[in-house]
Image (tube, rainbow, N blue to C red):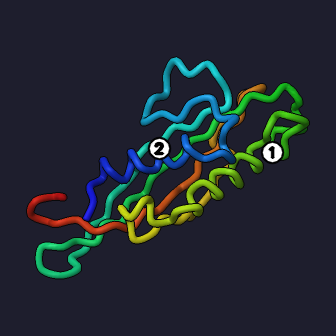
Amino acid sequence: MSTPTQIINQIISQLEDSSDLSYIKQVSEMKRANLAEFPYIIVAPLTDQEEEYIHNVQDVFMQVGLLVYIKNYDVDKHLTGSGSIKGLADVRNDIAKAIYADKQLNDLAIKADITEVNYDEFNDFPISGMAISLTVHFRQNSVTRT
């Protein structure tokens, strides 16, 4: 059984430890200010839905937003990237590799899945952003919350 804190910490660890995302400058938890180095990822829990599984055990479906921001001075390459600068589509693919390398999040979750990507999260040239929705299914004791 797991807690929301454990799930969030594991998502951050998995993103930070992925060799596919070695170019990401920072992965932070709900911090939106003072991020000057690009690209970066903000991990933000959005919603929880709890359902009774068996006595004192709940299934929890947590929606987690992964907000990704890149800086690219080539106006035509924000989606596909150019040279050594990754585009949003490249970063999305690399995030999927990092998450799907261990969909059980180090045995804390039943599974984690990317359920939606919004490529129009933020556009203010030369910065672009996208929002990735990640659904994490895990179990928690409804009494002890562990």
Q: Residues within 10 Å of mark 2 (few under 14, many from 20)?
A: some
Q: Amino acid at mark 2?
A: Ile
Residue lying farthest bottom? Answer: 54
Q: Specify the quadrant of the image occupied by residue 98.
A: bottom right
Q: Which residue is mark 2?
A: 12
Estimate the spatial distance between the alpha carbons at disc 2 and disc 1, rounded to whole Å: 24 Å
Say if 40 sits above or below 62 in the image.
Answer: above
Residue pictured at 30% horizontal, 52% vertical: 4
Q: Relative to residue 44, is residue 51 depicted above or below?
A: below
Q: Going from the N terminus, do you reach mark 2 or mark 1 first?
A: 2
Residue of label 1: 79
Q: Secondary structure at mark 2?
A: helix
For label 1, count other residues whose C-alpha is less than 10 Å away and answer few (under 14), some (14-19) or many (20+): many
Q: Residue at x 25, y 73 (%)?
A: 51
Q: Quadrant of the N terminus?
A: bottom left
Camera-side residue: 107 or 124? 107
Side of 111 relative to 52 (left or right)? right
Residue type, label 1: Leu
> Residue 32 at x, y = what percent?
49, 28
Foreground label between 2 and 1 = 2
Instruction: Farthest residue to the left: give it.
Output: 143
Q: Is residue 136 left or right of residue 18?
A: left
Q: Does residue 25 appear left or right of residue 51 in this picture? A: right
Residue 40 drawn above or below residue 48: above
The x and y percentages for residue 79 are: 80, 45
Horizontal and vertical percent position of residue 19: 66, 45
Q: Quadrant of residue 73?
A: top right
Look at the image and tell me in which quarter the C terminus lies: bottom left
Identify the residue shown where x is 71% and y is 46%: 91
Q: Secondary structure at mark 1?
A: loop
Find residue 5 and report its horizontal and vertical position in percent: 30, 47
